[in-house]
Amino acid sequence: MSVMHRIPALFLMVFCHVVVIYHMLERRYGKGKFVLLSCLYAASFVCMGTYMYMMSGITMLLVYLGIAVCLFFFFCIVSKECFPKKSFLFLTYFGLFSIIDNILKLMVTLFLPRLPALPGFYLVNVLRTALLLLMLALYKRYAAPVIQSLADIKKGRWWNLALIALLFYLLQVAVTVLYIANTMSATYLLFLFITISLVMCAVYAVVFSNISYMKKDAEAELIRQNAEHFSSRLSVLQSAEDTNRRLRHDMRHHIDTIAAYAKTGDNAAILSYIGEYGNEISEAAVKQYSVNRTVNSILSVYAGKAEKNGIDFSVRCNAAKELGVREIDLIALLGNLLENALHGCQESGRENKSIEIHIRLQNKRLIVLCNNTCSDDLELADGLPTKKSIGISSILSVCRKYDGNLDYRKENETCSACAVLNL
């Protein structure tokens, strides 16, 4: 089989790689830049693949390793995931790719022995691409939501998962060497590859089952946060109701006082007294920040917390009455943003502390910007605090659920968090 006849298969292979990477990873760049980088990767892949088909022996093996390293670099460049997570996803995909490739080659050899080399070569490539795309669809449907919901999983855990993927890859590499060396019959090799793939699927099922339980724990934490919010809101409303009840009870005494001033004709005293009474009523009233009940409720709670801690609190909000965002998600987003801002102010150690929050709808996107005073020790990496709490993980989870993003920035003594949801 000539090298030229293999080149279309290389383009099909690199197309499969790019599609899988586009949908598997959390991309660092927009579509335009991703396409540009993909074209550069495709060109290098086809060139290296063509050269590999021209070589044999140790040179061919080295070129194959170079192709694998090139794919891994492409993984790292276009993804914004942490390095151990990239390693886990790459080893899983590359190992799966190799296992499927070897199984299909052995099946063609065993069950279609009379098939010419060129049709057999393309049959393997087409079937492998179809199976990988099918598995990608299953991954997006079942596994991806679980993985994305655990934005705060520690790097050590990702390294453990990457090690599992590496062990399976090395195992199938060892069997591949036996296949190339022709030391075992095709039937035994096929049995080995199928066994490895089944064990790999079983182990991954256990891994993702554990991750699913971790997700449920995270959701339980969100429910706890929501319960705390409603408890705080109830406390605020109860306090306001007690104050209003007291004012209504004292109304008769106020009327008697005003009547006494009126009898003596002391209009100045009447106006002064009414002014003081008006101020007292204004302070007792619950301030309206937004027409959206959930947003207004959250802002009211944290306005009270800020006031108790001597923190200036300002709001600009044009959120609609209905936002198309679940109430539990709004609470997780706004509540955690403001809770982190409150802690940031308290830990800053500065005399003048403030929280500013801007909420607006723009082009079917909900944009929430929260600025707060922060300490000099705050460190950011890839647009997020290096010390990620469960709160930031909850915010990230909501942003990803609505195909949005979260970005933290620090300037002087102010930390800015911008969350965007696509509605």
Image (cartoon, grey):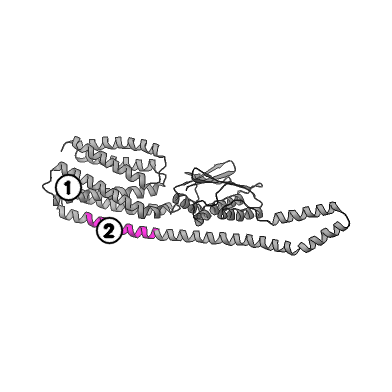
- Asked if residue 228 shows in the view, the reply is yes
Q: What residue type is disc 1 on?
A: Ala
Mark 1 lies on a secondary structure that is: helix
Mark sitting on residue 181: 1
Q: Residue at x 62, y 62 (%)?
A: 235
Q: What residue type is disc 2 on?
A: Val
Q: Which residues are magenta?
A: 193-211
Mark 2 lies on a secondary structure that is: helix
Q: Is 58 drawn above or below residue 334 in the view shown?
A: above
In this image, 2 relative to 33: left or right?
left
How many numbered marks appear? 2
Please state, as top left, top right, bottom left or bottom right, where the N terminus lies in the image: top left
Local crowd at mark 1 within 10 Å, few (<14), some, or many (≥20)?
few
Residue position marked by numbered label 2 in the rendering: 199
Depth check: 26 or 63 in front?
Answer: 26
Depth check: 266 or 69 in front?
Answer: 266
First-in-chain label (2 vs 1): 1
Q: Residue furthest right?
A: 264
